[in-house]
Image (cartoon, rainbow, N blue to C red):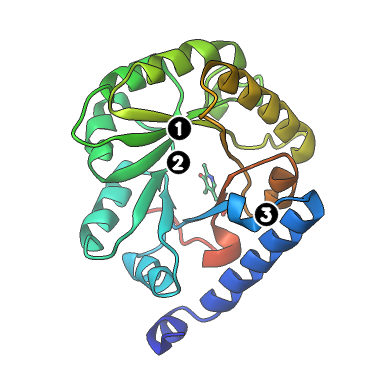
Amino acid sequence: MSESSGEAFPGLEERLRGVRAGIADACRDAGRSPEDVDLIVVTKFHPAELVAALAALGVRDMGENRHQEAQEKAEALSDLDLRWHFVGQLQTKKARQAARYAHAIHSIDRERLVDALVDGDRVIDAFLQVNLTEDPARGGAAPEELERLAERVLEAPALRLRGVMAVAPLDEPASAAFERLASYSERVRALAPEADAISAGMTHDYREAIAAGATHLRIGSAITGKRPEPR
Ligand SMILES: *Cc1c(COP(=O)(O)O)cnc(C)c1O
């Protein structure tokens, strides 16, 4: 590995290797190929230097959950060939700006957001975020809104519908919640067979997510280490 990344962020390479090994194990247990599972490293609150160190270790897919921070990092690191995944709540009025740097938006949760992204110069991967709880404050569309939202995305020239996304609830075993998510994925695929991606699985539940069919893991602290306080 490059010396600089090791010195600036001790343990980063080892943690990355550990998580990759954990993913491979979970895939083996689930009878799946690790090649069918994409790792997005969530770098929120960490400095651009840490993102650059991850890039030097071969990571290309980075996750961020705040527009301004993501925009600054994307700009600072524009010479690296990175793919930015927006995974947080996105304000409608910030959507078009996010569309300039984002490769994917995992948090499409309402029609107004789709309307804001309907046209643009680049095509962005779109994941429909589903709320797996009864609490609207937890983010995501209610399951009964999924079909309508999917149809809206399918009509948007600048969006490519990839599938569904969710965060596991705090008060329920992740595996049960991710089974529901898999059933929502089936509903979306009934409308759009190619939209077969499932974005699920974080530091504490990625094994359960892999068992339930996740194709895009969003893992932060297990790789980056403890997050600094948000700015
Ligand atoms: C922060 C965050 C993650 C990563 O969380 P970890 O527990 O650090 O792995 C994944 N998804 C979303 C939506 C997040 O906000």
**Image height check: is 86 above or below 131?**
below
Q: Where residue 183 sits: x, y (%)?
A: 69, 24
Tell me the quadrant of the picture where the C terminus can be found: bottom left
Q: Where residue 83 sits: x, y (%)?
A: 36, 53
Q: Residue shown at 74%/39% (left/top)?
A: 174
> Separation of disc 2 and disc 3 at Cα?
24 Å
Q: Secondary structure at mark 3?
A: loop
Nearest to the eye among marks 1 and 3: give it.
Answer: 3
Nearest to the eye among marks 2 and 3: give it.
Answer: 3
Question: Could you say which disc has been placed on residue 1 in the image?
Answer: none
Residue named by callout 3: 33
Q: Given the current orientation, which residue lies at the most extreme front position? A: 193
Residue named by callout 2: 87
Q: Secondary structure at mark 2?
A: loop
Which one is earlier in the sequence, the residue at label 2 or at label 3? 3
Which one is earlier in the sequence, the residue at label 2 or at label 1? 2
Q: Are marks 2 and 3 in contact (CB under 8 Å)?
A: no
Residue named by callout 1: 107
Q: Is mark 1 within 8 Å of ligand 1?
A: yes
Q: Quadrant of residue 74?
A: bottom left
Q: Residue shown at 41%/85% (left/top)?
A: 2
